[in-house]
Image (spheres, grey):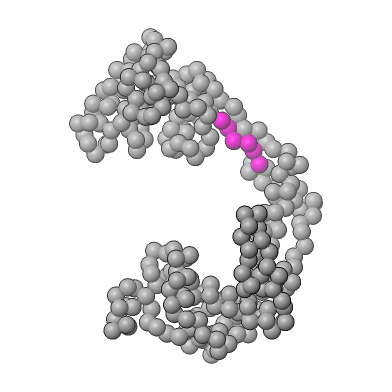
Amino acid sequence: MAHTEQAQNGLPERVPVSVNGIDIPHDAIARETQYHPAPKPVAAWQAAARALVVRELLLQEARRLGMAADPHSDEGGRRETEEEALIRGLVEREVAVPEPDEATCRRYYEQNRSRFRSETIFEAAHILFSAREDDAEAYAEARAAAAAALEDLKSRPDRFSALARAHSACPSAEQGGNLGQITAGQTTPEFEQALAGLSPGEIGETPVKTRYGLHIIRLDRRIDGAELPFEAVARHIADYLQENVTRRATAQYVARLVSKADISGLALAGAPEHRVS
């Protein structure tokens, strides 16, 4: 019956998982799946099982080396468990990597200068005529209303705020359509593209179509992003490079432990085939 329920839930059968003779309880794997979202339950289960197998491998190695736990607390007051402290201590001891020097950081900066810019800031306002494209009648009405408002604004651009208050379906209508300062990712791609094509003080000549409806957009101010000097991002670059190197070195260290371990019930890259059932 239990096997039938497992199959119906898309989970693997209750094949025992163990590391060097130490069992990983099936219930523990099931609880761990919440931290490994996946499109299918079986994929989440396998990811959870791999995580617990690696955790057990690291704990076994720390104990084999006779390491003692030294739990740390973070700024929020959260204290590590004994096992978390053991794993951290093991990685710090066995996977020591040098901090990247200034020359390495400068080289990365020069090769990726486009990444190190402050964001362009737009100050804008809009009038939203809300309608779904799959509602032909409502969409036609919105398009007609937007066209009429644009025609009005051609001769009276100072009426933008009044028209926004009267017609916009966005909460910004109460502020005359004013959206304040906008940076990349805060609006839809279509909206951002339209803003980028306007000059300060200009109202878009045609309504901009997004999933929310049709927008009449006015750009009030643009503050172009500027390249950040190396000194402003040096620490960020060093942390990024250190994290990448540490992650790769840790993965290699775990792979070495896996290659020497007796793991059953789960296939892991690097594990000897004759030891994986």
Q: Which residues are magenta?
A: 116-121
**Residue 107 x %, y %:** 74, 50
Residue 98 position by quadrant: bottom right
Q: Residue 272: in sight, yes or no?
A: no
Q: Quadrant of the N terminus?
A: bottom left
Question: Residue at the spot x=66%, y=46% of the render?
Answer: 112
Which residue extends farthest left?
Answer: 137
Give the answer, above or below, for where 63 lies relative to 201: below
Locate residue 231 relative to residue 174 in the image: left or right.
right
* Majority secondary structure of magenta residues: loop
**Residue 226 x %, y %:** 65, 33
Front residue of 69/177: it is 69
Q: Residue 101: in sight, yes or no?
A: yes
Give the answer, above or below, for where 236 lies relative to 271: above
**Residue 268 x %, y %:** 53, 78
**Residue 14 x %, y %:** 40, 83
Which residue extends farthest top?
Answer: 155
Question: Residue at the spot x=42%, y=85% of the render?
Answer: 15
Residue 69 position by quadrant: bottom right
Question: Residue at the spot x=58%, y=78% of the render?
Answer: 56
Q: Can residue 84 be found in the magenta stretch? A: no
